[in-house]
Structure formats: structure tokens, C-alpha cells
Image (spheres, grey):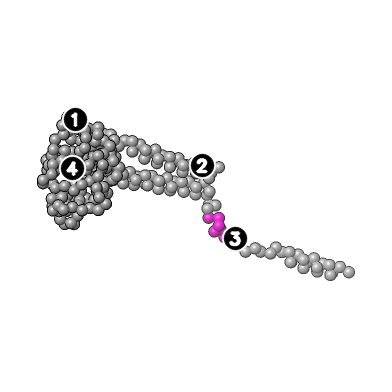
Amino acid sequence: MEPRRGKHCSLSALCCVFVLWTQLQLSWTQECPGDGRTWVPLGHKCYHFVHGEEDQIKSYTFESAKTLCQHYELLSIKSAEENDFVVNYSPRVWKGAVNVWLAMYYDTDSDDMKWHGNLPVHYTNWESSSFTTDLVPLDTCVTLHTTTGKWENVSCLEEVENGVVCEAYQSISCPGEEQVSANSRPLMSALVILSVVAIVGVSAVVWFLHQRHSRGSTIFTPFEYHPPLRMLDTDRSCLVESEETDSVP
């Protein structure tokens, strides 16, 4: 019964760890900016489609589009899921074809296109299979066509587009604490993981000590000393019996 009890204790410890992890995940709530504008969440980000409620969409230069985002950034697309989201949601706020500015620029240090924040571009969805442009590199910007989901190179200075989408990372709030940026989520997750690992380690030590205590000293039985077998006084008895037999007349 003791091994079964030890197994039951270890399962109980794992259940406690799972419950703790679940409670920590549920205690975190993600929220979009509360600035009075309409923000649509997707993953860890929120999106605001500018002038979606107006009957006629205005046109904006690249610089004016960035100004409209008011302390937030223009749209940057990092995956096909995000690209499809913008394409599928656009008809809900805009009528007809719209070209949306993307927060992509030419980096002179690496001679390549980068997202805002000097982030590399991994996912792309260009109109052609290869990236080609006749524009001067420093004057190269990118727009997204909401009808096809494809990207096009345009002039940052001469072109005007009629679609602006702003993005912001969702904030994470814990009960009784102020909101923190979603960029701190990896640190918080690491702390939680370390706590769970510590709990599992302590549980393993407790289980081992319990098993050792329940078995007593039998854990070392394979190393017990066994003296060599000694012959009983059988030979001596046989000799005595033989002498008695020989002495009988």
C-alpha cells in the first residue's frame, strides 16, 4: 500500500501545479487601448481602422497616416493570418477597394526593407513572385490592396492612399495591479514557469523522501553484507560416528 500512497502523493502534486498554472493564466486579462476609438483584437494585438464610419474615405500621405495613429504605429503584417484578417475585416468598415499603408521602410544600413522598430521582414505577399521596384530605395513604401491582399511598392512622398490601420499591443492586467505592456509578457511567463519548475522539484523531493521513509533501510538491501557460508560440523559428526563404529567389537 505504501508505493500506491507515494504515487497518489505525486499525482496530487502535479494536479496542484496544473491548477496553479491555470489560475495564473486566467488571472491575466488582455485589453485594447481605451482611448474612445474602436479597436479590434487579434492575438496579442489590436487594430483600429481609421475613418471606417465615414461615407467617403479620405486620402492620406504616408506621414499623415502615421500622425493619425496618435502614439501608436501603422499596420505591420507578420503572418498570413494577420494579412487575411485585415482583408476580411476591411469590408465591415470600408466600401470598395482600399489601399492600406504598411509601416515598412527602407533601411540604409542593411539595404533592405524593415518594419517599424528595425524589425526584419519575414512574411511577404507581393503582387509578383519577386520583389522589384523602379523607385529610389529611400522613397519606397508599401501598401496593401484589400481586394486581393497583395502588397505593392509605392512612393512614400508622391502617393496618397485611402486606407489607414493603426495597431497596438494589448495590455496585460493582473488583479490588484496596474496594466503592463504585452511586451513584458515573456518575462512574466518565465517567472511563472520558474515557479512551476520549483514546485515540481519540491514535490519530487518530498515524494522521494516519502518513498525512502516508507521503505526504511530496505533501499540499501542490495548492498548488505553477507558473510561466506560456513560448513556445519557435519564432517566432524561423521568422523565421530565412524570412530564409534570402528570401536564396536
Judged by its main secondary structure, the magenta piece is helix
* Disc number for residue 53: 1
For image coordinates 22% across by 53% down, the residue present is: 131
Q: Is residue 58 visible?
A: yes
How many other residues sit within 10 Å of disc 1, few (<14), some (14-19) or many (≥20)? few
Residue tagged 3:
226
**Three-letter amino acid code at disc 1?**
Glu
Which of pointers 4 and 3 lies earlier in the amino acid sequence? Answer: 4
Of badges 4 and 3, the one in the foreground is: 4
Label 2 element class: helix
Separation (CA) of disc 4 from disc 3:
85 Å
Image quadrant holding the N terminus, namely: top right
Of badges 3 and 1, the one in the foreground is: 1
Which of pointers 3 and 1 lies earlier in the amino acid sequence? Answer: 1
Label 4 element class: strand
Q: Are marks 4 and 2 in contact (CB under 8 Å)?
A: no
Which of pointers 2 and 1 lies earlier in the amino acid sequence? Answer: 2
Query: Is 223 covered by the magenta stretch?
Result: yes
Region of the chain picked out in magenta, as a range: 220-225
Residue tagged 4:
101
**Three-letter amino acid code at disc 2?**
Arg
Q: Are marks 2 and 1 in contact (CB under 8 Å)?
A: no
Separation (CA) of disc 2 from disc 1:
65 Å
For image coordinates 22% across by 46% down, the residue present is: 151
**Three-letter amino acid code at disc 3?**
His
* Disc number for residue 114: none
Residue tagged 2:
5
Separation (CA) of disc 4 from disc 2:
64 Å
Q: Along the horizontal axis of the image, is 16 left or right of 191?
A: right
Separation (CA) of disc 3 from disc 1:
91 Å
